[in-house]
Image (cartoon, rainbow, N blue to C red):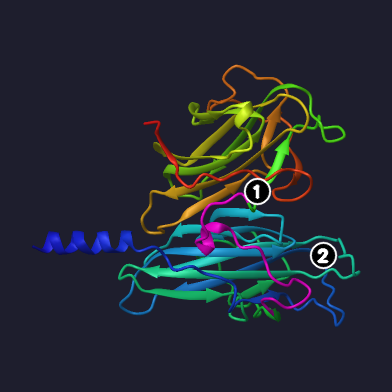
Amino acid sequence: MYNHIFLSLILAICATRALAIDFSASKWIWTNEINSAGNTVPGSRAFRRDFYSPEGKQALSANILLTVDNAYTFYVNGAKVGAGTDWTKAQAYCVRLKPDCNVFAINGTNYNVATPGGLNPAGVLAAIQIRYTDGFTQNIVSDSSWHVSKTVPAGFEQLRFDDSSWPAATVQANYGAAPWRNIQIPPSASSTPLTLQDADRIWTNEIVNGAAPIGARAFRKTIILPPGQTSSSATILIGVDDAFTLYAQGKVVGSGTTPNWPNAHRWVVDYPPTSELVIAIQGSNAGGPASITAAIDLSMDDCDCGSTLSVVTDGTWKYNKALPAGFQSPGFDDSKWPAAVVVAKYGTGPYRNFTIPAEAIVVNLN
């Protein structure tokens, strides 16, 4: 009987998705180095937020939304979770937590680059949803409860680091205020259905006057999951001008033909559990414009988070003008491949939008 009750509790926790989080209660914070005009000293600064579970509760996981103007490296309990360099787009993370005490740490960097208005602001914006083993949640936001340092001491991200002498963060503005305004939130954080709206159209550097050479090109993206996370399923939405073959973990998922290029394709792909998913595409151009546009949602195996990790085509993908043998395989070395060229944002310019299928085709690669 007790095993049955325990199993029912676990299933209930795993079946309950974490509530959608946003920045509505978050503040833009930094050190006190901001002058009256809104300019901030360039350089890196350290931020920490300790969190202790209330009596009688055990922390299970955290869903996190984060962005930093200009760049950051993010840690949880000393482990690197992620990094970002585009402050206009928040990143979403899901991590396991220790039951009692946890620390969120950020190495935030302000570049020596002014905005078109002549200002050089800096800020950290965060929203963290703590989930407990009993299913309850609690939110933490960036505010004056964070500690800051004008230097970045060695080991500052570690759980046992003593930040008791650090001052409180300086609150600059509420979310939505100038000069940052609203931040783009990824689909995985806002529970938005998978679309191509946040994706870029990418290709090689061969496009001249809107046209690319005829022929096939290779593209790759290695998706590295946060520490302790694995995935065994992904939903992929892709449109290619003109034809393509799509691979996941070195195996064929599906393809699209030249006459059918205005129609996007949607697959749900199952594969052996992995912490690194390699997506490869052989894209072919039959003449004129060429581009690849894709959005990928990886479902996490760890039911603690009940979340997805979202990836879109952008300048972090890589390409090769040839089709090297085995380029689609996870172990292939693409370290010398150049970064993909962003042709246009999906939905902008002269490019025609794809017709999106309502249903997905299920492909099992196990």
Q: Which residues are magenta?
A: 174-196
Furthest residue toward left: 1
Which residue is the extreme one toward the front? 259
Measured as percent of width and height from the top left, residue 111 is found at 81, 60
Residue drawn at x 44%, y 57% as measured from the top left? 307
Q: Which residue is mark 1?
A: 199
- Tell me if I can see residue 213 in this picture: yes
Sequence-earlier tag: 2 or 1: 2
Tell me the element at label 2. loop
Q: Amino acid at mark 2?
A: Pro
Q: Residue type at mark 1: give it.
A: Ala
Name which residue lies at 63% across and 33% down. Answer: 261
- Bin the neighbour count of mark 2 within 10 Å (Cα to Cα): few under 14, some 14-19, many 20 and up: some
Residue 21, position as x, y percentages in the image: 51, 69
Q: Crowding at label 1, few (<14), some or many (≥20) Cα neighbours within 10 Å?
A: many
Residue tagged 2: 42
Splitting the image into 4 quarters, where does residue 60 fall? bottom left
Indicate left or right for 86 with 161 as reference. right
Q: Is residue 269 visible?
A: no
